[in-house]
Image (cartoon, rainbow, N blue to C red):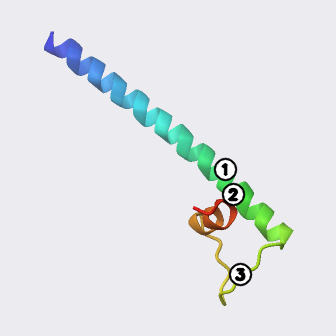
Amino acid sequence: MTKNLLKTISSLQNTAIGNCRKRIEEAALRAKDAIGSDQTAGDTQCTCHEPQCGVTSILKRKHGL
């Protein structure tokens, strides 16, 4: 009985980790696309001396996060 529960828990953990990895990879691809589109668009203005190209900075600019 205990072995079955441990197998079930392990299976659920592996499934959850796999789903998280897929979502992270998809988000990374979307971020790369966003970075590429920001560099070509040029419609956003940066008030700092260095351009901010991080994922967080792009999300803040585009979505107000």
The residue at 55%/41% (across/down) is 23
* x then y, percent, for residue 56: 57, 65
The three-letter amino acid code for the residue at tag 1 is Leu
Helix, strand, or loop for circle 1? helix
**42 lies above or below 65:** below
Residue at the farthest top position: 1
The three-letter amino acid code for the residue at tag 2 is Lys
* x then y, percent, for residue 45: 76, 79
Picture quadrant of residue 43: bottom right
- Residue behind mark 2: 32
Residue at the farthest bottom position: 49
The three-letter amino acid code for the residue at tag 3 is Cys
The residue at 72%/58% (across/down) is 34
Q: Is residue 39 left or right of residue 22?
A: right
The residue at 68%/80% (across/down) is 51
The image's mark for residue 46 is 3
Residue at the farthest left position: 2
Circle 3 packing at 10 Å, graded few (<14), some (14-19), many (20+), is few
Helix, strand, or loop for circle 3? loop
**Towards the viewer: 38 or 12:** 38
- Residue behind mark 1: 29
The residue at 66%/56% (across/down) is 31
Q: Are marks 2 and 1 in contact (CB under 8 Å)?
A: yes
| Mark closer to the chain start, 2 or 3 | 2
Circle 1 packing at 10 Å, graded few (<14), some (14-19), many (20+), is few
**3 lies above or below 37:** above
* x then y, percent, for residue 46: 71, 81
